[in-house]
């Protein structure tokens, strides 16, 4: 194990241990799925407090005042000397008394802790009102309701549990968030989901993409590129996919930032928090809330050089129940709308519409969309005939929380030089772990190398001419093109017959021996 992997393992174990300890303290009071809001919300509160403190301290230290600590000055001095210009730079402002470290220091003795926290969160959001960052900050703490009865029936109970959560988060040794080897926020989210699996499938599993899968998609869309204009996720959930682009490609230039749309309010808030946690400033991201299929909110921003997405699988939508949708510029080219019961190709056509002429999209898909008939076949035919399908990758099963389905990745591009499609069967590329399978670095590299080389590999990859796909009735299932290895033991009939003959002979000898023993016993009576 490398030094980095060792540090990652230690930091992850520390994070998990602390979260579990906090969960132990508040167990029985807060439902597991609601509990995640309090953990993630307070992690975020700690981060932005440390972030703005470091922002001010660094400037003062560089100016010569090496003993300066923003957390120690008065609110009056901060308001007078530090607020001006800060919201334009950072997107928000926090007074010293409102900082996480100062609140947690007095939390055990504060009879008004729950209302003080509510006021602090309102003040942080309020600091952005009237500024360009207002939309990026508004409602960020909406799910972190510190006055909710979910925390306890009385104020004393609420404060006790809030104090336990704050102190637990304060004890997590992050050094600083930016130098961490792990994605602390993503890891905390992943851990919480995996430990509340029964709720995860219903409430969050469809929105959350495990980091190893995010890593694969990020590398697929960036492979061979030195820079892109911007990255977009039309169903961005907690933002993990677009943030992997930043994590994986610091050396590349993502010139115009990070864009996403999300329908679920909780995940919309988490995605914006996640941007700040990864030091993506408010003016470098645009996360909007709404129904991507019926109310797309980034029309003015397209086209995008990179699109990564894990849309919800086979959900219902209005489809041809709204006759105007067939005229929508996103869906019209295929001549058919995705069926009412399966919106998958609506998301795919939306992404294709937003993709630039030199861009690449990588989308996690439910396997059924590659072979089902009807309107879905019509849309597949449009995509194949117009040479938009670049690659279809079969992933292992049990990678995602809340479902064991073996999903696929659809890679699309508008600038292909050959009218062929690459099929990769990566169903065996995984490491088995307790709750879910994971893609290791070597698995990701194996897939990427094959994606890059575009060569046939027995039982793993097939580079297929468009005509062959036509002959297969536009079926895009990987198993149609990549032969499965027969792992059954090869039996030599001749050897088998010899072994049977030997066994029969032994049985006869044993029977004869038993008969002798029986006769001797009978004679002796």
Image: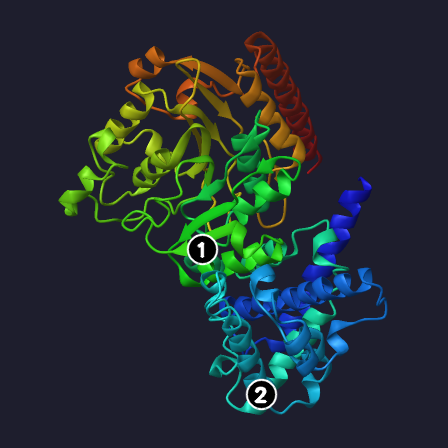
**What is the x, y in percent for residue 431?**
63, 38
Q: Relative to the observer, which residue lies in front, 481 or 47? A: 47
Q: Which residue is mark 2?
A: 157
Looking at the picture, does residue 375 appear above or below residue 211?
above
The secondary element bearing badge 2 is classed as: helix
The residue lying furthest to the top in this view is 494
Alpha carbon distance from label 2 to label 1? 30 Å
Name the image quarter holding residue 281: bottom right
Callout 2 crowding tier (Cα within 10 Å): few <14, some 14–19, many ≥20: some
Which circle's residue, 2 or 1, is located before the other in the chain?
2
Q: Quadrant of the C terminus?
A: top right
Looking at the picture, does residue 173 appear above or below residue 372?
below
Tell me the mark number nearer the camera, choosing from 2 and 1.
2
Callout 1 crowding tier (Cα within 10 Å): few <14, some 14–19, many ≥20: some
Asked whether residue 432 is in view, the answer is no
Tag shown at residue 201? 1
Q: Relative to the observer, which residue lies in front, 471 or 173? A: 173
Q: Residue drawn at (28%, 19%), measured in percent from left and top?
A: 473
| Number of marks present in the image shown | 2
The secondary element bearing badge 1 is classed as: helix
């Amino acid at each position: 194990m490398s030094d980095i992997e060792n540090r990652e393992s230690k930091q992850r174990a520390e994070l998990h241990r602390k979260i579990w300890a906090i969960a132990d303290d508040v167990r029985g009071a807060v439902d597991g799925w609601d509990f995640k809001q309090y953990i993630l919300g307070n992690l975020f509160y700690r981060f932005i407090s440390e972030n703005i403190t470091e922002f001010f301290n660094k400037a003062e230290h560089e100016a010569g005042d090496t003993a300066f600590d923003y957390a120690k000055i008065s609110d009056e001095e901060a308001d007078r000397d530090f607020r001006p210009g800060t919201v334009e730079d950072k997107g928000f402002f926090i007074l010293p008394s409102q900082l996480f470290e100062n609140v947690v220091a007095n939390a055990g003795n504060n009879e008004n802790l729950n209302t003080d926290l509510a006021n602090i969160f309102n003040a942080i959001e309020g600091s952005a009102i009237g500024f360009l960052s207002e939309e990026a900050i508004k409602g960020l703490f909406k799910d972190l309701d510190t006055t909710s009865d979910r925390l306890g029936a009385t104020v004393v109970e609420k404060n006790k549990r809030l104090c336990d959560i704050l102190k637990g988060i304060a004890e997590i040794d992050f050094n600083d968030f930016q130098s961490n080897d792990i994605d602390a926020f993503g890891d905390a989210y992943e851990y919480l989901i995996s430990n509340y699996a029964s709720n995860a499938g219903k409430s969050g599993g469809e929105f959350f993409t495990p980091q190893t899968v995010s890593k694969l998609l990020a590398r697929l869309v960036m492979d061979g590129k030195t820079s892109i204009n911007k990255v977009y996720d039309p169903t961005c959930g907690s933002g993990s996919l677009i943030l992997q682009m930043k994590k994986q490609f610091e050396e590349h230039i993502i010139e115009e930032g990070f864009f996403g749309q999300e329908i679920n309010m909780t995940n919309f808030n988490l995605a914006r928090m996640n941007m700040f946690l990864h030091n993506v400033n408010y003016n470098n991201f645009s996360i909007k809330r709404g129904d991507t299929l019926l109310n797309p909110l980034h029309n003015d921003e397209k086209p995008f050089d990179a699109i990564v997405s894990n849309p919800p699988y086979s959900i219902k939508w209005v489809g041809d129940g709204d006759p105007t949708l067939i005229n929508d510029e996103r869906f019209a080219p295929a001549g058919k709308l995705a069926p009412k019961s399966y919106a998958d190709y609506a998301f795919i056509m939306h992404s294709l519409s937003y993709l630039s002429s030199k861009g690449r999209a990588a989308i996690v898909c439910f396997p059924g969309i590659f072979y089902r008939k009807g309107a879905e076949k019509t849309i597949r035919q449009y995509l194949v005939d117009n040479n938009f399908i670049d690659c279809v990758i079969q992933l292992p099963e049990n990678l995602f929380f809340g479902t064991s389905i073996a999903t696929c990745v659809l890679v699309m591009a508008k600038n292909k030089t050959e009218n062929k499609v690459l099929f990769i069967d990566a169903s065996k590329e995984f490491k088995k772990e307790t709750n879910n399978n994971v893609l290791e670095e070597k698995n990701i590299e194996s897939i990427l190398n094959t994606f890059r080389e575009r060569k046939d590999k027995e039982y793993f990859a097939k580079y297929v001419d468009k005509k062959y796909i036509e002959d297969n009735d536009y079926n895009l299932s990987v198993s149609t093109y990549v032969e499965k290895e027969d792992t059954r033991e090869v039996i030599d009939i001749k050897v088998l017959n010899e072994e049977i003959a030997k066994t029969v002979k032994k049985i006869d000898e044993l029977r004869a021996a038993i008969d002798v023993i029986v006769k001797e016993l009978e004679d002796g009576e």
